[in-house]
Image (spheres, rainbow, N blue to C red):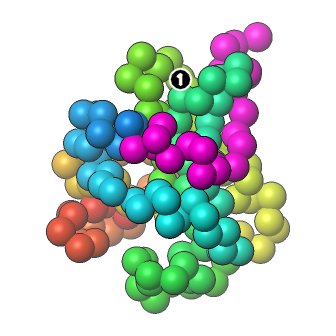
Amino acid sequence: MSESSNLALRPAILADVSLLRRWEKQPHIAAAGIDDWGWDVELARTPAWREQLIAELDGRPIGFIQIIDPDQEDSHYWGDVADHLRAIDIWIGEPTELGKGYGTTMMRLALARCFADPQVTAVLIDPLTSNTRAHRFYQRLGFTFLEHRRFGDDDCSV
């Protein structure tokens, strides 16, 4: 049994704010274009189109996942998109847990959540174009490149 089989997802809650703020300041997360998500406000909201999750290894938080319905999301970050899609943001917050396969397990758990809804047809991701490590990660999981797109100040690969 691999260590990653002890990995579980739970809803992110207001008590996680300090943890999430600490994680988003980590160099490996800042380099991925993650900025202030307004955790105090966002974790207090529970819109039907979004799940914000903490990944725990043996009960110890190691990462974060957000799954959204990009067609319903209120900021319209993704613009006009088809129905029945999901978009995922994912990161491992604890630097000591990088490179151990936990990101792969986290993403597989997130994808299983997405496709548990039989209407979901595809999942979108938007790593920075410069984040080649993330591109390789997503390719190994079966994602294919669709287009380059600019989101705000960020050049991303969708």
Give how far across and how far down residue 108 sits, in percent. Answer: 65, 41
Disc 1, SS: loop
Q: Residue at x 61, y 69 (%)?
A: 45
Rendered image quadrant of residue 72: bottom right
| Magenta span of residues | 1-21
Identify the amino acid type marked 1: Gly
Say whether residue 140 is left or right of residue 126.
Answer: right
Q: Quadrant of the C terminus?
A: bottom left
Question: In this rendering, is residue 49 above or below 109?
Answer: below
Q: Quadrant of the N terminus?
A: top right
Give how far across and how far down residue 99 sits, in percent. Answer: 43, 20
Farthest residue in the bottom direction?
80
Question: In this rendering, is residue 4 above or below 85?
Answer: above
Q: Residue at x 28, y 72 (%)?
A: 151
Question: In this rendering, is residue 79 above or below 21?
Answer: below
Give how far across and how far down residue 24 sits, in percent. Answer: 35, 43
Count of all numbered marks drawn on residues in the image: 1
Q: Residue at x 33, y 57 (%)?
A: 36
Q: Residue at x 30, y 34 (%)?
A: 26
Say whether residue 97 is left or right of residue 10.
Answer: left
Name the residue tied to disc 1. 101
